[in-house]
Amino acid sequence: MIRLDRDKIGEAGSQTILAEAAEILRRGGLVIFPTETVYGLGGNATDPAAAKAIYAAKGRPADNPLIIHIEKPEDAGTYTYTNDTYRRIAEAFMPGPITVILRARDNIPVETRAGLPTVAVRCPKDEIARALIGKCGFPIAAPSANLSGSPSPTNARHVADDMNGRVDMIIDGGECEIGLESTIVKIEEDGSLTLLRPGRITPEELRAAVGQVRIASAVTAELRPGEVALSPGMKYRHYAPKSPVILLDGSLAACVDFIRREGKSNAAAIAYSEDVEILRAAFPELTVYAFGEKGDEAAQAHNLFFILREADKRDHSVIYAPLPKRSGMGLALYNRMIRAAAHHIVSL
Ligand code: AMP
Ligand code: MG
């Protein structure tokens, strides 16, 4: 694991580390690097063997395609067929926490896109990520740097917990600013847009940039038996800690009553900061994780995966958490948390 400071990125020491990382990638190796969303497990996106190595390191099913990371929004045209909608999205949000799905050109191997005719493209804002892609001169395929099925890592310690010994290099760039994976949108050939995975960029912001946005039903609902996921990753139990998670939809008083009735030992709760002390006073044995203030969804997003991974180390019998609203960035929290809870919601 090598530490890299964003404010020293121009210095010789940092440039040497980045050059070494680029060389590892060029030779077909794997490098984990920070982005503004979560840490990515990177390989050369134009190298079929590197794509296979990524799947093996993560234990990821080979039918779940990878996101390719480019240095500049214009580079998308080299690897995909872009259109006007892409240009509007790029102008409004790139570089930034958004991934677009477009028809792929032949220079992206089928291994990277898991056999699909399309490929997911992202231009990250994080300076370490951009500097690394720039040094490579080829796009970096990078899914989140966790073992398949676990919550995405948002700091280098959580990366190492899953990935030590499985990759050639880990770049430690501190805590990820956003802490939730990118917003994923599919751009159809007719220019229309479908939201496949919500993130920091909200449906409201997307509508302001391009007009109409369809929201895939799997964003908020369980897939029906036999239904095909528009985004292969949506069909997997995802973001899930080992302990069962139960989402509580009700007032604090109703939640307190419910937790008391259940009477579980070694239970935990994820609570809005305002409610932390009240819960601790009511249940001295309960482990309470501070989620962030009510209404501060950016803080909650930043904390969610960190909390889920910390909670995982304590073998809780159950983790109670509040059910987020579905508006704004709340939709991204809702989408991740219903998966962490395997859709277990209790209305109080
Ligand atoms: P991760 O890399 O772990 O953030 O996950 C990437 C997500 O993007 C997964 O849910 C994939 O299924 C999805 N994805 C990647 N490429 C495509 C594609 N061509 N079409 C639809 N979804 C995709
Ligand atoms: Mg992932």
Image (cartoon, rainbow, N blue to C red):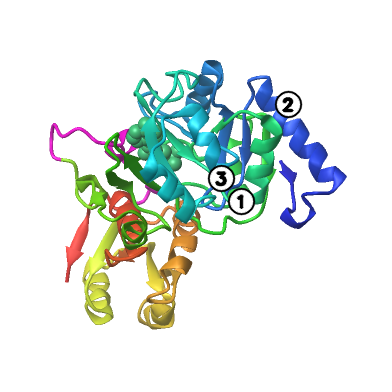
Residues under numbered marks 1 and 3 in contact, where contact means CB atoms less than 8 Å apart: no
- Give x and y (percent) for residue 122: 49, 41
Tell me the quadrant of the picture where the N terminus can be found.
top right
Residue identified by numbered label 3: 39
Query: Dot 1: what SS?
Result: loop
Residues in magenta, as a range: 224-243
Residue identified by numbered label 2: 23
The amino acid type found where label 1 is placed reads: Asp
Q: Main secondary structure of the magenta part?
A: loop
The residue sitting at 84% across, 48% down in the picture is: 11
- Which mark is first along the chain, 2 or 3? 2
The one nearer the camera, 65 or 127, is 127
Is there any visible trace of residue 290 in the rendered image?
yes
Residue positioned most to the front? 84
The one nearer the camera, 11 or 152, is 11
- The residue carrying mark 2 has its beta carbon less than 8 Å from ligand 1: no
- Give x and y (percent) for residue 189: 29, 34
Horizontal side, residue 249 vs residue 49: left or right? left
- Which mark is first along the chain, 1 or 2? 2
Give residue 200's quadrant in the image.
bottom left
Give residue 322's quadrant in the image.
bottom left
- Which mark is first along the chain, 3 or 1? 3
- Give x and y (percent) for residue 26: 67, 23
Against 29, is 194 above or below? below
Residue identified by numbered label 1: 126
